[in-house]
Image (cartoon, rainbow, N blue to C red):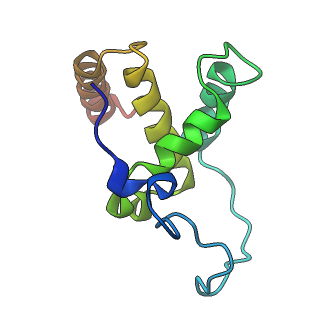
Amino acid sequence: MKPDNRTFTSARESGRGYHDLGGLDAGPVEHEVTEANPWEKLSVVVGNALGPKGAKILRTDEIRRVREEMGVVLYNELGYFEKNVEAIRRLLVEKGVIDPQELESRMVQIGKRIGTDGR
């Protein structure tokens, strides 16, 4: 069963959604160019492999919908690449491609491995 996200999506609310900052003053723009971290680059590769030019499991409009349904707290807490990874995770669970408990178990294993040998 899908969660009821009507309070989180601009499509179901009148006016502007929390994710829609177009035309608003959002503060100063940082012009510093930074190198993407390896995990950020990998997230783009995974997204491309699953998306429009890859396996076509995920679509661009689905990624956008899920990003917009995260809720204001999570949306503002996560960075750009983190939002994409979370959107991909949610869509793969939603579509039944991955089991959330199996994913969580695997992440615990990876966390232990990283904690012991740094890889």
Asked whether residue 47 appears in the rendered view, the answer is: yes
- Vertical placement of residue 54 versus 8, above or below: above
**Position in image of residue 58 (x %, y %):** 59, 24
Kindly give the residue lying farthest to the right in the view shown.
53
Task: Give the residue at x 63% y 37%.
Answer: 61
Coordinates of residue 48 in the picture (x, y in percent): 69, 27
In the rendered image, which quarter is residue 23 located in? bottom right
- Residue 22 in the image: x percent, y percent? 66, 73
| Residue sitting at x 29%, y 42% | 4
Choose between 28 and 51: the one closer to the eye.
Answer: 51
Residue 82 in view of the camera: no
Which quadrant would the C terminus be assigned to in this image?
top left
Side of 24 relative to 95 (left or right): right
Q: How many labels does the image show?
A: 0
Residue at 64%, 87% (x, y): give it. Answer: 28
Q: Where is residue 90 in the image (x, y as percent from the top left)?
A: 40, 32
On the picture, is 105 further left or further right than 91?
left
Q: In this view, does 46 lie to the left or right of 101?
A: right
Depth order, front residue of 11/56: 11
In the figure, 1 relative to 65: above or below? above
Question: The N terminus is located in which quarter?
Answer: top left
Q: Quadrant of residue 55?
A: top right
